Each structure stands twice: as structure tokens, then as C-alpha cells.
């Protein structure tokens, strides 16, 4: 076959990106779990026959996509090339050969064209329940965290493994939901395969070798060009975060070489007894993401553009947990990796990276059941409800931080209406949290208030998965801290930031999610922006006066104008 022209190759590259985006959207439309349908907690990608990722969907999270970049090689090794057949579908939720914890199921499908193996499609999604203790940090080993599915065939030459399906059903709380998600994952890979076959027929391809070489070569050269233009050097970054019972210290040495960037996590805290440990594949995923965002954001994500970013961490530090460490909430620590890297990168590339933000997602899972203190109504039922929420992002060198926006995860905040449809939970309040964004030349993004309870006749356990309770986001270049996380019951009962906690019938949980930090001195903020924040309710009168120097008379005039509907 004649080698495609550069124009044709670029068209095919764009086509592959559109194919995997359609693959991801098919998963969103067919998944059963609200975390996939509403929050987009998933990834999708296409790979060559050697297992190198060629393209990823825009929809999805870096923790999934970048971790999944390494996963297909594990599938090839475990299944064996001689056992890869047309009509196969493979599955796993192995934290170390998948995407970091048992709650992510990864499905890989080999793609054949005219009887020849052309490549693979892979996708992963966070599912609400995998059995065990449930989604939370309380386990002491991975064995307690739920059902483990080794890399194996879900479908063998078109025949589904019914025994595996029965095992899955027998070990989880929401069997229909989980099995539905498994079928959705397999189906979205099939959609990708069909579109790939159409493309190969249209461009008269017999395999993907030429387009694979084009994508990987150009991605690698473009990334290396960006790295070569950077000032060489080394810098240290550090962050202290809540942990479970004791604080966790993340230490990184970032070194820029002419042809690669190294992040070495020597000195980072050791393993925690509870499930907040991070497999190295997940640490690598967010370290690479942080560097790509800062250095080469417009270069498409694939095996070659990720390769120059090298990550090392001592075995059995909290960022390189090995089996059988508990890892269910690996995101709580893993999402702090980018801001730790940026603490070092800011020293080498001033005015490039944002201030610290909320970091980890403000997730919680509610396990509802009929009340046990008194007889429950016949309508009371059991349900598992997982909701994704976000604190504020850190301010950027030239822009305010985004309100209630997940960075680095990128998943969407789930609507109240969708959450309440999944079980007898009531979201009494969900709104932006004034004054939570750190003051600065550019203000940190706001966190949120949430108030959560259950329908009449129910009690519940809440699995808290929060950080930034004791160590709020730090400002950069003179910016101020964001507000910390707060959690408690409506009767004043204090609650922990992590772990399963009982909420009796009639009680509500009151949560205040953290804000992002500010960037630059608050004294230099544009007065027009200060007045606008005040008029919108993003900051209080006290903050406008204390941090930004507005006089009482001006504050009153601004608020009077705002009452009339005029915003600065």
C-alpha cells in the first residue's frame, strides 16, 4: 500500500480522535452508573496492534486516560498474543494493571479488519459499587475493598463468560447496575471498532502501521521541541495534606533535561494504613497531565507525547503503593500531585502555573436503608448514591480561578436532580460558597455549600472523601489561601473528612467545600473586578473592605446598584 500523504495522515489522525470521542459518548449514553452518565468519569482510547495509545477521547479524566495508556500492554501480556481472537472482549479492575482502584473497570477489545488484527479499543469507567466495604477509605488492604477481576476474557470469540457474570452479580450491592455498565463498556468499544473499519475502508488501509508511525513520530518530536525550549534545571516542591489520621507530605524533585522531564518523589510519606494509597500508574498519570497542561497542552495525548515525562517514586511510599495496599481513594492523594509539581515548576517557569486549588474531588457516597430506631414505612428501601462535586480551582497568572470546577480531574459536578433520582436522598442545599476563593490579584475559584439528608423513614451512612480540612489551598506569588473544607451534622455534631460515618433518621450533613487560592497580591486587583465580585455575592462586605480596601460608602453603593440588577 502506498504511504499516505501528510494531509491524508492528518485527516486520519483527526478522524481517530473523533472516533474515540464517539466511543466515549456512546458510553455516557448507555452506562447505568450516574458517575459515568452525569459526571463523565470515564475514558476511551484507540491503540495500535503493539498496544501504544494513538488517540484519546476529549471526554474523560486524565487519571483514567493516562493510566489506561499503560493498560493495554498488560492485557497483551496476560492474554497472550496467540490467544487474541476476533470477537474477543477482555476485562479487569486490577488497580496496578488498570487505573488505580477496584472501582474502575477497564474493558479492552481487539479490532480486526479483513481477518487481520489491526489494533485495540479500550475504555474504563468508575462504577458505583464493587462490593466489599464500599467506596471509601476504611479498608486495611485491597482484599477488603471489593471484588477483584483479573485480566481475563469477558467474551471469547463471541461467547460471553456467564460464570464471570454470575460471580459479579453475587458479590455486589447493585448487580443490575454493574452488569449494565460492563455491557456498556463492551458496546462502546464495538462502536469504535465499527468507525475504525469504515475509516480503513475509506482510505484503503490494510493496517494502522503508517498512521501509527505518523502520529507517534510527530507527537514525540513536537513534545521534545517544547521541552528543549525550556530552561534546564531542578527544583523542589512540597505539599502537606490531611491524610486519614495523620498528615501526608508529598515531596517532588522536578528536573528539566533537554529531552525529558523527570519527577522524583523521594522523601514522600510512606504507606497509610487506610485506603488513600496510590499505585504508581495513577501517580504517573497525574504527573504527566500536570506537565502537559503547563508545557504542551495543545499536543494530542498519546503514548509518544507522554513518553518524555518520566516518574519515579520509592516503592511503598504513598505514591507507589504495591499490592495488597488499600487504594480505594487513591484519587484523594493522586489529585494533589499536579499542585505539588507546580510548586516546583513555578520556580523554573515563573508566571506559568496556577495557584493551588481544591485538588481532590469533593465526593461522597451515601448508603441509605430503612430507619432502625423505629419501624420504617413499607416504602423505605436500600440504595447506594454516589455524587461528584468540586471545590474551587486555583487562580491563574492572568485569570481568576474557576468556581466549583474540578482540577485536575476534569469530571463534571453532578446535578441535584440526577442524584436524587438514584435513591431516597435529598439535597437540601447546593450553592456557591462566598469568600471561599483566596484573595489576590486574581481571585481563587469558589467552593460550594451542600446540605444532604434522606427521605422520611431512612437513615444512612456517608462515606466522606474530603481533603483540605486542615491544609487549605496555598496562594502563589502573594495570593492568599482558599477556605478549608468543613463538615458536620445540622445539630452541631462534628464529622471527619474521611471515612464511613452514621447519620441517624432526621439528621442532615452540612458540608462546605474548599476554595482555590489566590494569585498575586490582593492590593493589585482591578477595582472593577472587586466591585463585580461584591455585586455577584462572590465576596462579602467584610472581605471587600479587609482584603481589597473598599470603603464602606463604596460598598454600600455597589450593593445598592446590584439590587437593581446592574452588575459591574
Image: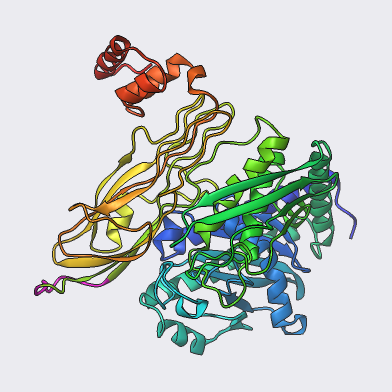
The quadrant in which the N terminus is found is: bottom right
Residue 366 percent coordinates (x, y): 31, 64
Is 192 positioned to the left or the right of 548 in the image?
right
- Of residues 541 and 146, the one nearer the viewer is 541
Is 379 part of what is drawn in magenta? yes
Front residue (pair 37, 12): 37
Residue in view at x 66 percent, y 36 percent:
346
* Placement of 113 over or under 168, stated as above or below: above
Image position, residue 552 (x, y; %): 29, 13
Using the image as rendered, state which of residue 252 and residue 426 is in the foreground: 252
Q: Quadrant of residue 95?
A: bottom right
Q: In the picture shown, does residue 225 fall above or below 456?
A: above
Instruction: Reply yes or no: does residue 398 show up in magenta.
Output: no
Instruction: Give x and y (percent) for residue 563.
Output: 24, 19
Q: Is residue 115 left or right of residue 443?
A: right
Give the residue at the far bottom of this rendering: 163
Residue 22 seen anywhere in this rendered image of the structure: no
Magenta stretch: give its range: 374-382
User: Would residue 257 be seen by someone viewing this image from the given angle?
Assistant: yes
Residue 343 to residue 31: above or below: above
Q: Is residue 59 above or below residue 276?
A: above
Residue 271, x across and y down, in percent:
56, 67
In the shown orientation, is residue 319 left or right of residue 435?
Answer: right
- Identify which residue, 51 or 349, lies in the foreground: 349
Residue at image coords 58%, 76%: 91
Amino acid at each position: 500500500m502506498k504511504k499516505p500523504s501528510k494531509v491524508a495522515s492528518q485527516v486520519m489522525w483527526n478522524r481517530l480522535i473523533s472516533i474515540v470521542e464517539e466511543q466515549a459518548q456512546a458510553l455516557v449514553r448507555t452506562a447505568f452508573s450516574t458517575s459515568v452518565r452525569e459526571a463523565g468519569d470515564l475514558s476511551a482510547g484507540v491503540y495500535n496492534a503493539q498496544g501504544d495509545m494513538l488517540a484519546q477521547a476529549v471526554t474523560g479524566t486524565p487519571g483514567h486516560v493516562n493510566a489506561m495508556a499503560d493498560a493495554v500492554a498488560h492485557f497483551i501480556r496476560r492474554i497472550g498474543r496467540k490467544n487474541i481472537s476476533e470477537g474477543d472482549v477482555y476485562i479487569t479492575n486490577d488497580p496496578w494493571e488498570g487505573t488505580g482502584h477496584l472501582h474502575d473497570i477497564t474493558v479492552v477489545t481487539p479490532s480486526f479488519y479483513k481477518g487481520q488484527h489491526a489494533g485495540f479499543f479500550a475504555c474504563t469507567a468508575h462504577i458505583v459499587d464493587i462490593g466489599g466495604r464500599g467506596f471509601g477509605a476504611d479498608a486495611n488492604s485491597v482484599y477488603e475493598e471489593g471484588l477483584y477481576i483479573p485480566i481475563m476474557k469477558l467474551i471469547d470469540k463471541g461467547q460471553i463468560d456467564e460464570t464471570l457474570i454470575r460471580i459479579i452479580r453475587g458479590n455486589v450491592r447493585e448487580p443490575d447496575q454493574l452488569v449494565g455498565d460492563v455491557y456498556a463498556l463492551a458496546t462502546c468499544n464495538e462502536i469504535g471498532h465499527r468507525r475504525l473499519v469504515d475509516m480503513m475502508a475509506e482510505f484503503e488501509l490494510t493496517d494502522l502501521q503508517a498512521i501509527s508511525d505518523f502520529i507517534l513520530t510527530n507527537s514525540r518530536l513536537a513534545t521534545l521541541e517544547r521541552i528543549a525550549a525550556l530552561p534546564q534545571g531542578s527544583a523542589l516542591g512540597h505539599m502537606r495534606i490531611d491524610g486519614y489520621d495523620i498528615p501526608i507530605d508529598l515531596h517532588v524533585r522536578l528536573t528539566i533535561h533537554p529531552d525529558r522531564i523527570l519527577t522524583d518523589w523521594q522523601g514522600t510519606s510512606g504507606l497509610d494504613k487506610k485506603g488513600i494509597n496510590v499505585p504508581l500508574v495513577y501517580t504517573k498519570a497525574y504527573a504527566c497531565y500536570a506537565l502537559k497542561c503547563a508545557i504542551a497542552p495543545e499536543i494530542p495525548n498519546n503514548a509518544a507525547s507522554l513518553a518524555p515525562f518520566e516518574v519515579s517514586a520509592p516503592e511503598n511510599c504513598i505514591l507507589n503503593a504495591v499490592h495488597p495496599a488499600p487504594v480505594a481513594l487513591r484519587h484523594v492523594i493522586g489529585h494533589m500531585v499536579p499542585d505539588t509539581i507546580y510548586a516546583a515548576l513555578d520556580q523554573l517557569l515563573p508566571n506559568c502555573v496556577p495557584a493551588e486549588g481544591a485538588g481532590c474531588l469533593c465526593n461522597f457516597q451515601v448508603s441509605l436503608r430503612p430507619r432502625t430506631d423505629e419501624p420504617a414505612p413499607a416504602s423505605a428501601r436500600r440504595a447506594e448514591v454516589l455524587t461528584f462535586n468540586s471545590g474551587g480551582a486555583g487562580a491563574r497568572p492572568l485569570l481568576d480561578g474557576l468556581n466549583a470546577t474540578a482540577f485536575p480531574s476534569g469530571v463534571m459536578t453532578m446535578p441535584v436532580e440526577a442524584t436524587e433520582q438514584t435513591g431516597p436522598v435529598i439535597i437540601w442545599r447546593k450553592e456557591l460558597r462566598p469568600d471561599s476563593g483566596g484573595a489576590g490579584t486574581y481571585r481563587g475559584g469558589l467552593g460550594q455549600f451542600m446540605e444532604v439528608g434522606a427521605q422520611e423513614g431512612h437513615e444512612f451512612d456517608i462515606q466522606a472523601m474530603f481533603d483540605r480540612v486542615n491544609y487549605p489551598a496555598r496562594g502563589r506569588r502573594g495570593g492568599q489561601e482558599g477556605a478549608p473544607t468543613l463538615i458536620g451534622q445540622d445539630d452541631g455534631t462534628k464529622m471527619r473528612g474521611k471515612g464511613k460515618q452514621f447519620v441517624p433518621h432526621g439528621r442532615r450533613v452540612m458540608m462546605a467545600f474548599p476554595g482555590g487560592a489566590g494569585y498575586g497580591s490582593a492590593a493589585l486587583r482591578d477595582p472593577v473586578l472587586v466591585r463585580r465580585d461584591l455585586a455577584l455575592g462572590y465576596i462579602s462586605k467584610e472581605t471587600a473592605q479587609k482584603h481589597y480596601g473598599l470603603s464602606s460608602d463604596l460598598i454600600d453603593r455597589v450593593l445598592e446598584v446590584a439590587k437593581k440588577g446592574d452588575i459591574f
